[in-house]
Amino acid sequence: MSTVQTTLLDFSVDPKDVKNESQLSILTTNIENVLRDFLINLKLMSTFSLDGEIYKVYTGDMKSVVTLRIFNSGLITINIEYLKGENQDDLLPIEKYRQMEQNLRGCGIKRESWFAPIKRGTFCKYYITSDERLIEYDIDDLLFEERSPFQKVQVVHSQSLGNMLVLDDLQNIAEVDLIYTETLMAKGKESYKDKEIVILEEPKNVIMLEIDEVVIRACSKHMRSICGDVLDSRSGPNYQIIIGDCLQSLSAFHKEGQTFDYIFGDLTDVPITETSETWNFVKNYLELSFKILKPSGKFMTHGNGACCKTALQRFETYLSTLKPSLVVDKCQSFIPSFMEFWVFYAIRFAEQD
């Protein structure tokens, strides 16, 4: 499978060495001479200046396009982009880069860094952490993709994580993520026997609320190691799956006077920004959930990545304003498919104490 490969190189020189045209001309010529030793048939196509900063565009072997930019601060970037066939070698493998790096030091380079090529093709291999750091996954297949009225739904296959559900380009759960479910449920700490649950010993009744039929269909086929066969039918002796808006269902439970021992709020992440519309949704489902939670019940939910301290603190501060008062227990676990620590909450009414 062919992929577009983009290699990013960063260098820096002393800012005083890029103050005039003569200095820039000498520096760019020296860099070009080094590049030609490693990028065969390098040809200059265009040169222009942006507020005294040099920008050059080249072409080379494998129909590559190379850009060189020298900033007034002394930062230098070189971007190399080309189409790599399935059986072709890298245009600039790391061994060649190491040698090129040594040669560039003769141009007055003070610092250098090299990034593994960004690979773009039939499907995405990259997702972000909760604080927007880019991670490359070992994804080798796209098993399912469909845009529902609510979101883009995908199931991809990772060589190390197994099948992984991805919603709106955010990793949701993978086959190796049992720790996520166990932490959310506080396995080993909570007993679910004979309890009424909104989403396992033997619970009396479990109700699952899911707005997106497409997610159900994708998971029932491609995530069976997690779901088993419970998504094949929407009800069983002790469970029911309701497709629809969870806020409407929670409101209906409240009007009917129905209450639950446990409610799992495995919904959206705690919003990063305070002005996000998602905050209104979070506040609405929290308010409704506590209205149908039994006095001795618990609300179990996840927050966000442990590195999103401001968002988590905002969430906890909001919980502290709710009446009746709440007791909030917090823990975290490393989730394989997220590649980061994730924060979970177990919340109960303070009156229990």
Image: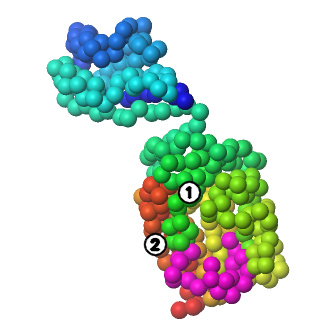
Q: Is residue 195 magenta?
A: yes
Q: Is residue 130 visible?
A: no
Q: Residue 284 location in percent, x, y?
A: 68, 66
Q: Which residue is mark 2?
A: 331
Residue nearest the viewer, comparing 27 with 100: 100
In the rendered image, the residue lying farthest to the bottom is: 353
- Image coloring type: rainbow
Residue under pointer 1: 174
The residue segment tinted magenta is: 185-206
Residue appearing at x 36%, y 19% in the figure: 68
Say above or below: 289 vs 105. below
Label 2 Cα crowd, 10 Å radius (few <14 / some 14-19 / many 20+): some
Q: Amino acid at mark 2?
A: Cys
Q: CA distance from mark 2 to mark 1?
A: 21 Å
Place of residue 305 in the rendered image (x, y in percent of width and height, measured from the top left) = 47, 59
Mark 2 residue element: strand
CB within 8 Å, label 2 to label 1: no
Identify the main secondary structure in magenta.
loop
Q: Residue at x 34, y 28 (%)?
A: 93
Residue at (62, 88) in percent of width and height? 296
- Residue 94 makes an appearance in the image: yes
Amino acid found under the numbered disc labelled 1: Ala
Query: Any mark on residue 223, and which?
Result: none
